[in-house]
Structures are given as structure tokens and as C-alpha cells.
Image: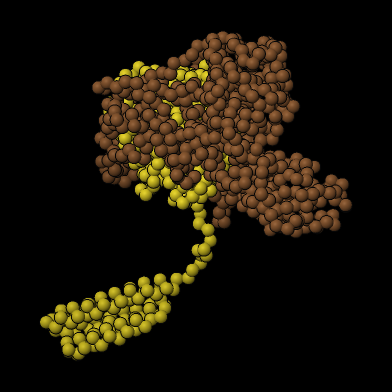
Amino acid sequence: MNISYKWLKELAPGITDSPERAAERLAMYGAPVDAIVPLGAALRDIVVARVEAVRPHPGADRLSLCEVNAGGERLQVVCGAPNVRAGAYYPFAPVGAELPGGVRIRKAKIRGEFSEGMLCSERELGIGRDHTGILELHGAFTPGEPFASAVGLDDVRLEIDVTANRPDLLSHWGVARELAPGGEAGLRLPAVPGSAVPPLLEEVRFRRVAREGQTGGVAVAIEDPRGCPRYLGAVIRGVKVGPSPEWLASRLRAVGLRPVNNVVDATNYVLYELGQPLHAFDLDRLAGPRIAARLAAPGETIVTLDGERRTLYEDMVVIADAERPVAIAGVMGGEDTEVTEATRNVFLECALFDSRAIRRTRRALGMHTDASDRFERGVDLEGPERAARRALALILAVAGGTVEPEAVDVYPEPRELPVVGIRPQRASLVLGQPFDAATITGYLEPLGYTRVSESADEIRFRVPGHRVHDTTREIDLIEEVARRHGYDVFPAELKAFRLGTVPEDPLALLEDRLRTLLVGRGLLEARTAAFAPEDEGDVALLLPLSAAESRLRRALVPGLLHRVEHNFSRGVKHIRLFEIGTVFAPGPTPQDLPVEATHLAGVLTGARTPPHWSGESAAFDVWDLKALLMDLAAALGLGDGAVQPGAGAEDGAPASAAYVPGLTFHLMGPDGQPVGRGGRVAPHAIDAPAWADPVWAFEVRLDPAMSQPTMPRFRALPAFPATERDVALLVPDGVPAARVEAVVRAAGGPLLEDVRAFDVFRGRAVPAGFRSIAFRLRFRAPDRTLRDDEADGATERVLRRLKDELGIERRS
Amino acid sequence: MSEIDLVRDLERMEAEALEAIRNASSLAALEEARIAWLGRREGRLTAILRRLGELSPEERPRVGAAANRVKTAISELLEARAAELSSTQEVVTEDLTLPARSTWVGARHPVTLIIDEICSIFRSMGFVRVRGPEAETDWYNFTALNTPLDHPAADMHDTFYLADGILLRSHTSPVQVRTMQAYRPPIRIIAPGMCYRRDPFDPSHAPAFEQIEGLVVDEGISFVDLKATLTEFARRLFGPRTAVRFRPSFFPFTEPSAEVDVSCTICGGQGCPTCKGTGWLEIMGAGMVDPAVFESVGYDPERYTGWAFGMGPARIAMLRYGIPDIRLLYESDVRFLEQFA
């Protein structure tokens, strides 16, 4: 909402704040000011000039030579505007002047003729968009007087951010009410400049009717009281439509509006002044003449003021004459009945429309106007009659004409203003400091609340029409008290508190441990959006932003692989990412919520350590992945043996990517079902450049039950030395190393402390179909130093068992 | 040869030996000195010790003790001088200015760093961390939070719907509702999580983003508690000299509602592009829980009061680390993520 600071002070002469101070106060009342724009400062070099004579430029058809009176000697100015004429006043930038935006005017020679300054358009002055011609000023001026003060643009614009609950702040009156000393009591409507017409046209009588009435021969009816609860109509005859006087045009420019003509400008002025949208129709173009607020008929269309033909739906409220819609109620008028320079007689509408109907309509049509903005949020329930009188006064003052003495006020079900109570004790409890009845009343009355009764424990207030939209309950009044008291005045005093009954989320603790683990292993945490293309998700969005974001992901790895591709595309080769995030599966039925699970996933590619001058660094390989999976298994409390070679096909584990067969692992859960997978990403599953190393990935489903960290348990340190024996075994290719190790452990007896494969070898001296695996066996007795023959004996037992059970021989 | 002669010899020898050792300028020279004095065959001290036998049994221990003292003194100096010489004389064969062998650095995501920090501050003030589902019904996301379904926020174009009445939560506030349904007061929770709004990615918007919700409910909880707790929080997060400002605002599910500003972390309140010249940065929305929310979860609003807040850790991360574009947070560029190690 744009506020003219001059306008504000005119409504509330008691405001003495600077614009900056007013902005601070507004922020503390809940309407922060996004920008303070000094309008006059940028125009300080511009003056008003009269063009005394115009003649064609001898060297150019489209240019004219103007004799300009800017208060001193006559100047010759070359002008390219089609609308320049002798005897008219224009804003003028003399030689040496700086235009808003920084352009400096110099004496120039244009097609052989000197030009000593520039006559300016709205756009060149930064006060409007029009640049079809120079800005002709309407009214009486003195050549050479400063332009900004002459037209009233020696002003400051405040751009106010108004929250959805405060439609009353969408007007100068409403903002002035917040700032004025004494609130509402400190406000007054000023007289119309240069006119004897009073601020409000009192001599018109608005005759209240229930459903249908008439004024000046125009039948006025409400056929849809839901969509249009109240409709005031008035007729003005004999207007002279033309440009607005400068004070009015500049007022509108100051708040960012484009002046149209005096009648339309007068209605827009009232909208910005009082917050009540109005609409003026060309009475002679209304069929009937009749005006009705009704629902649109199927297939009806209207060409709106912006020149668009719009198709209407049956749930839209329209204003129609006897034949067709002439306005989309509360949104925009129709082009056919618009007030133009040819208009002589005007029908003025001042109505209330249902906020939901307006929102629905303007959204369906994709429109957004000053009027819809206010109706959507709610206008002053008590405001229409005053706004109509104000608009009539303005129209008479700037466009002349006479008003039909009996106007009409169609009001099918007059609404009572609600009464709401507030208990001082409750206000004190909620706000945390005492408020008595007098203080509360002192805060509320200036805002327009009227005290209707007061008992020992409750005060009751009648809510003013401009606040009925957000004040319906006691808490709304309590908020008002807090707001007017000032949030900054409340103490910030910490008090004792009781601990809550809600237990800590166990998964959050697990996630934290996993992050610590993976960060310690050199991985970088990624956060990716949960959206996925159709082939990567099973839960669809109804209205996705794009096809690549049309589903919710079923797994994390595909998203991470896209992130790997993103890094590849930027030339990044060494990538270690992990993510903890939510994945989605369809619910039991489409009416159920999707099933969510928290997954952990990671991807690795590139060198295992940062490249170093001392030697080549190997790329991540399957053993790095296995190590990571084993670390995870331990952190998840999955126990030894949780990491198993996987089949590579779809196997019930949280599937995420296509892995290379033979290079996959399963992470087995406590129930023997896989909770995760990892492996080498199949080349077809990722778009990798030729220089990329193999990509490894893993994904695990997290479960709050996994989150109990295993408690360490002390074991006594060995007191006696160990004895080691190395055995190299010829292991057939079909026998997994883990199985050999298991037999070794079982056969080694109590003295066998540890078994570790330390070499794997194929080739010379190893028959085809076999490999040599060397194990180091460590024996130790807890209570004595082992003798060599004890270790030898145990080793022999191991070798015998290997031969008996697996047919495995020692390599000779 | 008398005892006196020998002792005099010893003393003279000691002085000479010590001086020679001190003057040895290399390890080789030092070794020569060692051989000259202590060498088994030719060493001068060794020679004197050999002559102990010429003394009487009474003299022998006294001279022996003196000889040992001299030997110890020489040995100690030899050792010290050797250490001196080797530390200054060892030949440097490595160019130690070459880069070290490093390991990859891991890092938490910058938004996680902020969430962790915020949660730890609130934990220290008695809050516990909870979570709720990201897909919600419109009842939890809107209706129960005093937001009618014809509210603009509930529109298809602003919120992602999955089916009629099922949506991706547009804020973490449904966790308030679920928590109050499941537990009785007192409640003191903090709930970080993902939220979704139908805003395409641009420098300051993301369709999926993190939010942190907080909720306190008990008897006698007031606006002063809200202000005090959040002021304390803001000072712990942004620094003890941070100014904190509460401004009236509007959210359907709190009343009175407040916008919480802190003095700009970049300019300290003087006004700069980050704070758009205002000196203030908006960091969260907060307010007293609206009685309508208590009614929708079956709490007696006359008995219980509470307050809630919501804030965006991504925005705070951007402020804290000077990140100019929110998309950097979700692109997972390794060169970006490594900066937070």
C-alpha cells in the first residue's frame, strides 16, 4: 500500500512525525514500511514553463520549435511531442537541470536548431509511465515556479506492507487513524482544493430499500444478496469530463496511480483516501436504465477496461444493466460503459461485495486490482455512505454537474456491528503483565471501538465497521491491547519453566551420530529436494512445477546421482556425498497419507585420497564401499556379518539404483531382511564423462529401533605374549573367504585369538580355478606364555579341519 | 707417582678435554676427541686409570673416585656436544615446502550446521526435538491451525497437493497439532523439518526448504515468556550484543502474533544492502497460540496458554555464511559443500 505523506498529514494535522519516524511507528503497530521514497527531491531542478508559441522545426517534420517562458527570458526549445501547444503549461528541465535517473540537460543543437532545455513527459520525470507526449499541466501556474510544489509532488511516498488481517490499513484514513494523536478523533476530511463544495456532499439523501429501488430513473436491484450485501447508487447529470486538476492528478501519481479523467480519478482518490472502491458508469450507455448485482449467466462475456474479453462463470457476481454485464463486481468495470470525455451523465456505484466471491472470481480470471484487493480482505462495513458522499463532492468539485437529490441504498439485510468482551484479568494473563480496564479502554477507543458496558470482570466493546473482519473474539482485542501498548515495552524477563512430557525423537539422535560418522569419513552432506521424475517415484503431485519434479522420490540414490552428474558437468571428479532424507511410498489407498521413511544414502567416486605429488592416488573401489557399509552396520547396531554380498537383482532391499552384478552388498537387518544396499552404479544408470572413475553408492533405511548405541564393554588387556602362524591356502574359486575364515575360527580352539587374511594371490604355482589366500593366525593364552608346540598343534588342527570340511590344502 | 701428582694430572686433563670437546666443530672431530681422551687403547684418561694400580690401597679409592668424576664430566659433555652438532649439522634431504599428504574432508551441510546450533540452544532451555510427517492432510496443515481452506495459502497454486485433502506440508506447524494431540501439557518442543511451497527455484526461493517449529504450552505461559525466551535465543545465536525487536504481525494460528527482527548481522544496524537499509533482519514469526488451535486439539484454552514460532534455517545459513543464492544450498556442488568443513 502506497501512502502519500502529505495526504496523511492533511487527514491528521496532529501528526508531527518525520516520515522516517512515522515509518518506525507503523512498523511497531504491525505495518512495516518497505520503502520511503522522497518524490520531490528528484524533481528539484524541474520548473513549470508556459509554451508561448510553437512553430515547425525547419529541418525535421516531427519536431517543433517552442518559445518557452520559464520565468526569465524566452528560451528556444526543440520538442518532439505531438501534444505540445501554445498557451499550455508543462514541466520543464532547463539547461543544467538533472532529471530523476541522473541525466543532465545541456544546451544542444538538434537538426541545426538550438534547444535550451527540455519539456518533460511523465516517464522522464519518473512519476508515471506515460511517454506518448509531454505532461500538460491543468490549472493556474506561474512560469518558473518549482514543479514539485506547484503540483503537490513535494511529497514522500511510504510503501507499507499490510498484513492480510488489516484491510483497514489499505487507505490513508486507516493509516492516519493509527498514527494520529487521539486516533479516530484526530482525523478530519479536508475541503476540496479550489472549490466551495464541502468535503462530504450532505444534501443527497440515500433512501434505504430492501431489494430494489431507483434513483434518477435508474432501477437498482440486488439479486444476489450473498455476493453483494449492499449497493448504493447515485446519479450525477451534466458533468464535464476532462483532465483532473493537478492537485488531484499528482495525488494519484504520488501513490503510483495513473490519472485517467476527473470522474474516474475522483473515485480512485476516494479508494485511496477511505478504502472504499467505487465505480462510475456512463449512465447513457446503461440499457434500461437498470443496474443489478446478480450472478453471471453461463457463457456471458464482458470486455473489461483493460480491453480483454473475459468469459464469466455462474458463480461470479456481476453488475448488469438490462441486457448484459457491465462490470465484474468488485474487480473491474466494462469498457462499454466506461466514463470518457464524451460522458455527460454518470451513475456512481458504491457497494459492498462478499470477500470470498471476489477472491474466487478474480483468481479464476487471473486478475488483481486495487478494488479486488480491498474487497477480498474486507472493506469498512459502515463506510459506503460516507465514501459515496465524498466521491460525489469530489466529482462535483472537479467535473461539475448536479446530483439527483434522492440516491438509493439497497441493503437487504442490514448488519449489526458485533460486540466483543475483554476481561482485563485474561488480558493480563495472556500478555504476562497487568492491564486494567482504564488502560484497555484507553487503547481501544481511539481505534474506533466503542465501550458499551463494563462489569467487574469484563468490558464490552462495539467493533467499528473497519475492524469487523479481524475482531470477533476476546483474543483479538487482547492482541489490539498488546499492539497499542507496544511489543517493545513488554519486559523480556526469563522465568522458570516446567519440563515437557514429550520424549525426544530417537531418530534425530541416530541421524546426528551418522552424520558425525560420515563426516569423519570425509563425506559431504547434501540436501536435495524430494521431487523426482516419473520413473523415480510412486507418489504423484497433482500440479508439479515440471515433469522432472512430478513425483516424490522412492529412494535417495537417484537424486544423489543427479547431483553427481551436476558435479561432473562442472568438471568436479572427486565426489563424496551423503544425504539423510525422507522417501515416499503410496499409502494403502489414495485417501491415505503416503508412507514416509527416513533413508541414508551416499555416493563415492574419484580418488580415495586427495591427489598428492608423492604418487598416484587410487580410485575408490569396492573395499572402500565395504568399509563404509561395515562402519554403518556397526553404527546402526546391526551386528557382525550384516554386510553380505548381494545378488544384484531386485531383491527386496531398499532399491535405489541399478548396480553392477557381482559388485553389490546387502546390509542385513536384525530380522534377516535387508535394510540397505550398496554397490557399483551400473554405467547405464549415470551420465558420466569419459574421465570419471567408477561410481559407488549405498542406501539404508533408518529405523528408530536402530538407534541404541552399543555400550562398550571392557576386556582385560593381554598379560602374556601372542604367537603367530601364517598359512597360505589354496582355495577353490567357489568357496568364499568368509567361509574359510569361519572354519579356521571354529577349529582354532580357545587359544586362537584372531584370524586375518593378509594376502590373496593368483598365478604362478597356483592351479587354475584356485586362489591362494594367506591367513595370519594369532594364538594366545590368558595365563601363560604359549609354547611353540601348542601353536603348531592348533595350526595343524585348523589345517585338518579345512581339508576335511572344505577340501582345502595348504599351499606348498 | 704420587696420589697428588695423579690428581693434578686428572684436573689438568679435565680442563683440556672439556675445552677440546667444546671446540670440536663436527661430529667427526668430536669422535676424535672421544678417542683421544676415553679411547680404550690410547685414551689419556684410560691411561691414568691403568696407573691406579701403582698407588697404595689407601690412595686408590680416592684417586679412583676423582677419575670417575672426570670421566663422567667428559662423557656428559661429549653427549651434549654431539646432540648440539647433530641438530645443526644433519643434512636436509626433503623440501618441506611441498604440499602435505591430506585426507578428504567431510562436512555437515550448512543448513544442518544452523539447525544443530539452533536445536542445541533450545535444548539447553529445556526443549526436546520431535518430528512429524512431511505429507499431511489439509486438516493438520490448515484447518486445525485456524486457517480456512479458502485461505490463499491453501490454493493449489501455492501448496503442493497429492490428492484431494492430502498435501505436502507448507510449514512445520502441523507438528504442533500432532504433538498436542498425542501429549498433555506441559509441552516444550522444537521440530525441524522439510516444508514445501509451490515456488520455483530462484535466488531466494526453493520449492522444498527447511523450517524449525517451536511450541511451548503450559498453564500461565504469557507473551512475556515468548519475548524473553526468543530474545535469549537470538542473543545466543547471533551474539550477546544483538538487538532484538518484536513487531506485531499476523499468522492465522497465533494471536497476538509477532515478527522477530535482529539487528543486522552485516552492518550492526547501520543499514546496508543485506538489511535493505533498515538495520534489521527478520528471522522468525512467532506468537501466542490461538485459542482456536487449542480447541482443535482438545486443550482447554481457558486453562492453557502457549506460544509458538517458526523460522527458516536456510535463510539464517545464508546470512551467517554470506551465501547469495539459495540454490547453492541444494545443488550439492562439492566445491560449495567443502567450504563448510
Identify the residue at horizontal 54%, vertical 28% (top origin).
A200
Query: Is residue A254 positioned above or below A207 on the image?
Result: below
Q: In x, y percent, where is residue A579?
A: 50, 35
Judge from the rendering whether residue B297 lies leftward or rightward of residue B205; answer left or right: left
Find residue A336 and report its image quarter: top right
Identify the residue at horizontal 75%, vertical 42% (top origin).
A133
Observer able to see residue A150: yes
Chain appearing in brown on the rendered image: A
Q: In x, y percent, where is residue A69?
A: 73, 53
Q: Which of B8 and A182 is in front in this view?
A: A182
Judge from the rendering whether residue A598 lies leftward or rightward of residue A794; answer left or right: right
Quarter in which the N terminus of chain A is drawn: top right
Count of numbered marks: 0
Judge from the rendering whether residue A276 lies leftward or rightward of residue A313; answer left or right: left
Question: What sort of colour scheme is used for the picture?
Answer: by chain
Colour in which chain B is shown?
yellow
Residue farthest toward the left in the current orientation of the protein: B58
Observer able to see residue A793: no
